[in-house]
Image (tube, coloured by chain):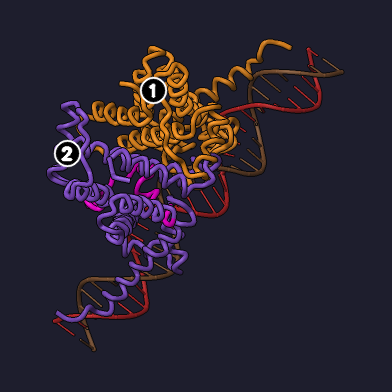
Chain colours: A orange, B purple, C red, D brown
Amino acid sequence: MSAPSIRARVRAEMIDEIKAVARRHLATDGANLSLRAVARDMGMVSSAIYRYFPSRDDLLTVLILEAYEALGDAVETADATADRHDLRGRWHAVCRAARDWALAHSAEYTLLYGSPVPGYAAPDDTVLPAQRPPLTLVGILRDGLADGHLAAPDDELPEQVRDDLAEIAAALSPGLPEPLLARGMASWTHLFGLISFELFGRLDRAIPHRDAYFDHQTGLMADLVGLPR
Amino acid sequence: MSAPSIRARVRAEMIDEIKAVARRHLATDGANLSLRAVARDMGMVSSAIYRYFPSRDDLLTVLILEAYEALGDAVETADATADRHDLRGRWHAVCRAARDWALAHSAEYTLLYGSPVPGYAAPDDTVLPAQRPPLTLVGILRDGLADGHLAAPDDELPEQVRDDLAEIAAALSPGLPEPLLARGMASWTHLFGLISFELFGRLDRAIPHRDAYFDHQTGLMADLVGLPR
DNA sequence: ACAACAACGAGAGCAGCGCTCTCGATCGTT
DNA sequence: AACGATCGAGAGCGCTGCTCTCGTTGTTGT
């Protein structure tokens, strides 16, 4: 067993460079990534790329996975950096981190949360990383319940809704009351919609002051889940 | 001025058939519409399509415009059909109508609310039709205020948020209190996110009972804007 | 040290795409 | 009846993802 051979090292660097160039193309040209353009940028012929990625979709899948991880990192870091007992501060920090990452990596965000590519099926590997942002929000709720600064709402849930949410709670955060989880999921849904609206240009003419609008909207959701002011 | 000539009539029918075939392709193959495939389906050669639409994007634009109108029709019809004084019933009817239309026309919904196509810029003609669903929701709020069954929240808004919302209110529904509009926009954002999550497969493993979940989530938003139970 | 093998880049080629141009055929009008 | 507009077919351009072959180069076992 020797140190990694020259070939293995070069291969790893090649893969990294392909991903980097692909990300650059993604940022400038949008979501329709051209393997041939990537190859050209690297001074290679298009078929050579296939030594490293079996298909364009496989390259996209890797980029998607890493994007999920990057977004997850950004969100969790924001949460960990905030004062642990300032629930509302954490909430806003997490939401802003998601938005900031999305604005800074719009094409990658589009890959994650935009329309699914027709022929493309997301592999199961994406399920866990995709849960990190909502899990972070749920973590704030869990902490709030634990130290008594947050009370679960006493909404009555239809049986089917309660059952579905109970299973989710069991997987995400055992013991989380279903009515609170329901409101948490509404917040997560709203956050996704908010970022998508902004990124996809739906606020262009309507909302000049995006930062203030975003904070106020996420504040409404903080109210909805019952975070103390 | 004569009756429309045979040629004009045939041309109109051709355009209609192209749009119909294109919609069918959209439904089966997803958002990447192939002009050549449409032409093949019509027993034509691809270049013949260009006698009727100057480019693929122009065909897409027409489909998008008509999709906006169809969604707007569905939503407004649902609102008009419900009991005018049952605010909550109207709210749920409107939300369900939007969701039903999206589920029944998923590719077209994706065209409207999915990631924007890279090279494609939405023409201004889409702005007004795109406002019809949120306008319908706002209409429910306006009616509620008018007959006293709905009270505007007394949220304090940051100045920038209040100013932006005041302009929107002036355009959409003059006199609508900004704090209520803020919550209405949160509801609309949430509704878009909710439908997109479902359509883009993000609830696939998590929520088996989609109908009940949807109604409960939109109910939470009805609470948020203050609709009486 | 040399042979055998695996990994690699270049190139040609296939089928598909959007789009353009040309050329007859057809239709409506004068 | 003749002319001009309209239309469909066909060839062709440059682009795409992807496959296959061929010569070269790095790695490994004897």
Mark 2 and mark 1: Cα distance apart in space? 29 Å
- For residue A99, above or below residue B108: above
Determine if the magenta segment contains residue B14. no
Q: Residues within 10 Å of mark 2 (few under 14, many from 20)?
A: some
- Residue located 54% across and 27% down the image: A175
Q: Position of residue B148 (x, y in %)?
A: 19, 46
- Residue located 46% across and 44% down the image: B213
Q: Nearer the viewer, residue B207 or B14?
A: B207
The quadrant of the picture occupied by the N terminus of chain A is top right
Q: Quick check: can you spot residue A20?
A: no
Secondary structure under tag 2 reads loop
Q: Residues within 10 Å of mark 1 (few under 14, many from 20)?
A: many
Which chain letter matches label 2?
Answer: B
Secondary structure under tag 1 reads helix
Residue of label 1: A94
Q: Nearer the viewer, residue B75 or A199?
A: B75
The region drawn magenta spans: B104-131
What amino acid is found at the position of numbered circle 2 in the picture?
Answer: Pro
Which chain letter matches label 1?
Answer: A
- For residue B51, above or below residue B3: above
Residue of label 2: B177
Q: Are marks 2 and 1 in contact (CB under 8 Å)?
A: no
- Residue located 55% across and 27% down the image: A174
Q: Position of residue B144 (x, y in %)?
A: 22, 48
- For residue C30, above or below residue B137: below
Q: Nearer the viewer, residue B206 or C24?
A: B206
Q: Is residue B137 left or right of residue B195?
A: left
Q: Position of residue A121 (x, y in %)?
A: 54, 42
What amino acid is found at the position of numbered circle 1 in the picture?
Answer: Val
The quadrant of the picture occupied by the C terminus of chain A is top left
Q: Quick check: can you spot residue B42?
A: yes
Q: Position of residue A53 (x, y in %)?
A: 58, 33
